[in-house]
Image (cartoon, helix red, strand yellow):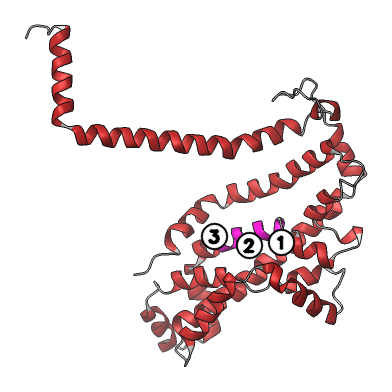
Amino acid sequence: MGTRTLSEVRKSRVWRLRLEPGKVYADLLHLLAHLFLLILAFFGVAPFVMLVFSAFKPYQELIDPFPTLLPHHWSVATFYEIFTRRGFPLAFWNTVWVAGSVTIIQGLTSSAGAYVFSKYRFPGKELLFRILLSTMMVPFAVVLIPLYATVAGFHLVNNLWAIVVVSMWNTFSLFTLRQFLDTIPNELIEAAQIDGAGEVWIFTRVILPMSLAPLTTVSVFTFLGQWDNFMFPSVVINELNKQTLPLFLNGLRSLYWTRYDLWITGSFLTVVPVLIAYAISQRTFVRGMQTSGLKG
């Protein structure tokens, strides 16, 4: 076979484009979609990258009218100050305790409620479930004052248990877990009942192990929500030794000054544990996202 001339190659390419215009449009759409996703990824990652590098900048560089991405002078003095002088370790521990307690308790209550709504039959079950779902449409600000009055009635103001008590139940977690439990065959439960297993044994030995993926998913959402929770703790917590991280970071500014270096470093230290937790549970989290919304 002889070599083709440049004009023949161009003609063949034009001919193929004419024969497959749909493929050209599909490739163009794929290209545009990838460009759009890259732009979104950039705007999502860029603030975090700036946060990381800014945490190592001295205060003078942060207020520079012509900032740079990389620090001119790398400094860890702010890390030392925030750990030793501003009560950050105590706020960090309070947040870990609150977020961990709420995640564990809410996981148990939501999985138990989802098990009841998925596998039990009783009058008004679907109506009650719809009423629960309708509460998701109510803004939290509407129930803020009644919740405060409730915890005040139990003398839980300035107590971390106030945050835990009002977060023991979550409708979104219940709904997500029920969607998954509906896919578990009832024959498994009936077989366990025939073997003499009680409801507690079935729930703890059959349902919970099979629900590990969606349970991890809702636990990650719960942990993140409590880790960043600001509105209700700002209402019920007034003592400095009971502050959580969002309240601690908010206290780094006043009407007259703002320590941007401490604010940025504190934000960086607040984000790191969340990223570590997500990295550990990433596979289970993704698998739970894929299966919790499916029905067989």
SS at badge 2: helix
Q: Which residue is mark 1?
A: 99
What is the three-letter code of the residue carrying label 3? Thr
Report the side of 164 relative to 257 (left or right).
left
- The earlier-in-sequence mark between 1 and 2 is 1
**Residue 138, x across and y down, in percent:** 62, 71
Cα distance between the residues tagged 3 and 1: 15 Å
Look at the numbered disc 1 and give the secondary structure of its residue. helix
Q: Are marks 1 and 2 in contact (CB under 8 Å)?
A: yes
Viewer-closest of 1 and 232: 232
Which residue carries the number 3 mark?
217
Q: Is residue 73 above or below residue 1?
A: below
The spot of residue 196 in percent (x, y) is 46, 89
Q: Which mark is residue 222?
A: 2
Q: Residue at x 39, y 83 (%)?
A: 191
Position of residue 145 in the picture relative to residue 47 (left or right):
right
- Which numbered tag is attached to residue 63? none
Give residue 260's quadrant in the image: top right
Q: Position of residue 153 (x, y in %)?
A: 84, 82
Q: Quadrant of the N terminus?
A: top left
Q: Is residue 123 left or right of residue 170?
A: left
Farthest bottom residue?
123
* Label 1: few (<14), some (14–19) or many (≥20) C-alpha neighbours in 10 Å: many
